[in-house]
Image (tube, rainbow, N blue to C red):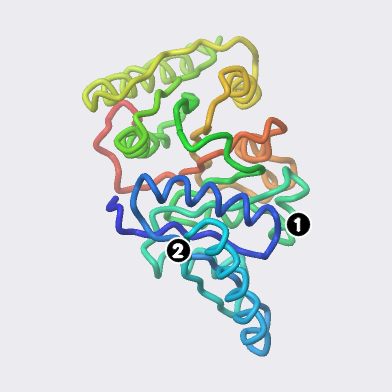
């Protein structure tokens, strides 16, 4: 994860896109990377007018903030082409704005989660402007799944640049097998973060829903970010009913959420197996 890789921001000239740009710039200043605004049009005939509009938007942003991001305009579909550009640019991650559940559906024409889980790079989804220039507290929910190992890699990355504190949150399960898996995941997380000298604390939450309680806890401590992994092979049923990831991403507290897709090649952290 080199800091010369850009941050990609899907851009539709809206206030939410501006929020995403503000978050992207906050991170880019510390990580020292470029920002790429991505606008997707439905027809090639729209490219010229979109280019003119984008040029004006970038110039206006430069006058206000002294930062001029580069931009890409391409014909295609947001379902496939956002992730094509992310791969093409070898992006560090993407930052995307959304208005909760309905906004997520509006953004994609269906489900924003469908865009997010197709990406090899993490997404940071935001609903408002940044609270501050710092990133001090990050909520890190820990459950029974073995697919969360890459969150540790990104926790190390964020701590390297922001010196933030991680709050390892869990709910104790009454199921013996789940309880054992959660404990194993917690041991591995603590070991990894300790070896990397990452500041963290373990927080036991009360309740039945890790998603709900993590959001409430994040709001209580005024967290800057919640880190989650998406579910492997998520189904249409999950999209329609609202997976726990979607609940997190579209949280009513408007806390930014970093979504990380599990990778098959990261298997060295055995506690997540």
Residue 115 at what x, y percent from top left? 58, 57
Q: Residue at x 50, y 64 (%)?
A: 83
Q: In which quadrant of the rendered image does the C terminus lie? A: top left
Cβ–Cβ under 8 Å for marks 1 and 2: no
Badge 2 is on which residue?
86
Residue 233 at what x, y percent from top left? 53, 48
Badge 1 is on which residue?
106
Residue 75 at what x, y percent from top left? 60, 80
Q: Is residue 270 above or below residue 169?
A: below
Q: Residue at x 74, y 61 (%)?
A: 109
Residue 33 relative to residue 109: left or right: left
Q: Is residue 18 above or below residue 63?
A: above
Q: Is residue 271 above or below residue 38?
A: above
Q: Earlier in the sequence, mark 1 or mark 2?
A: 2
Which residue is most to the bottom? Answer: 45
Helix, strand or loop at mark 1: helix
Q: Residue at x 51, y 43 (%)?
A: 259
């Amino acid at each position: 994860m080199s800091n010369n890789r850009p941050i990609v921001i899907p851009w539709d000239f809206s206030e939410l896109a501006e929020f995403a740009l503000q978050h992207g710039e906050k991170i880019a200043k510390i990580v020292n990377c470029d920002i790429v605004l991505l606008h997707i049009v439905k027809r090639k005939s729209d490219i010229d007018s979109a280019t003119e509009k984008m040029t004006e938007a970038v110039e206006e942003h430069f006058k206000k903030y002294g930062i001029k991001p580069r931009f890409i305009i391409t014909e295609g579909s947001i379902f496939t082409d956002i992730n094509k550009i992310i791969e093409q640019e070898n992006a560090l991650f993407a930052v995307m704005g959304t208005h909760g559940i309905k906004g997520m559906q509006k953004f994609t024409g269906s489900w924003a989660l469908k865009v997010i889980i197709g990406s090899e790079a993490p997404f940071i989804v935001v609903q408002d402007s940044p609270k501050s220039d710092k990133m001090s507290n990050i909520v890190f929910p820990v459950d029974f799944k073995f697919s969360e190992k890459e969150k540790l890699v990104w926790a190390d990355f964020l701590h390297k640049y922001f010196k933030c504190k991680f709050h390892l949150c869990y709910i104790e399960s009454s199921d013996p097998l789940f309880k054992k898996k959660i404990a194993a995941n917690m041991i591995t997380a603590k070991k990894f973060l300790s070896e990397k000298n990452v500041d963290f604390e373990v927080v036991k939450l009360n309740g039945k829903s890790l998603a709900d309680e993590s959001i409430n806890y994040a709001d209580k401590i005024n967290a800057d970010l919640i880190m989650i992994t998406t579910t492997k092979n998520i189904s249409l049923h999950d999209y329609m009913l609202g997976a726990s990831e979607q609940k997190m991403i579209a949280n009513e507290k408007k806390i930014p959420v970093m979504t990380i897709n599990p990778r098959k090649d990261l298997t060295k952290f055995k506690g997540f197996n």
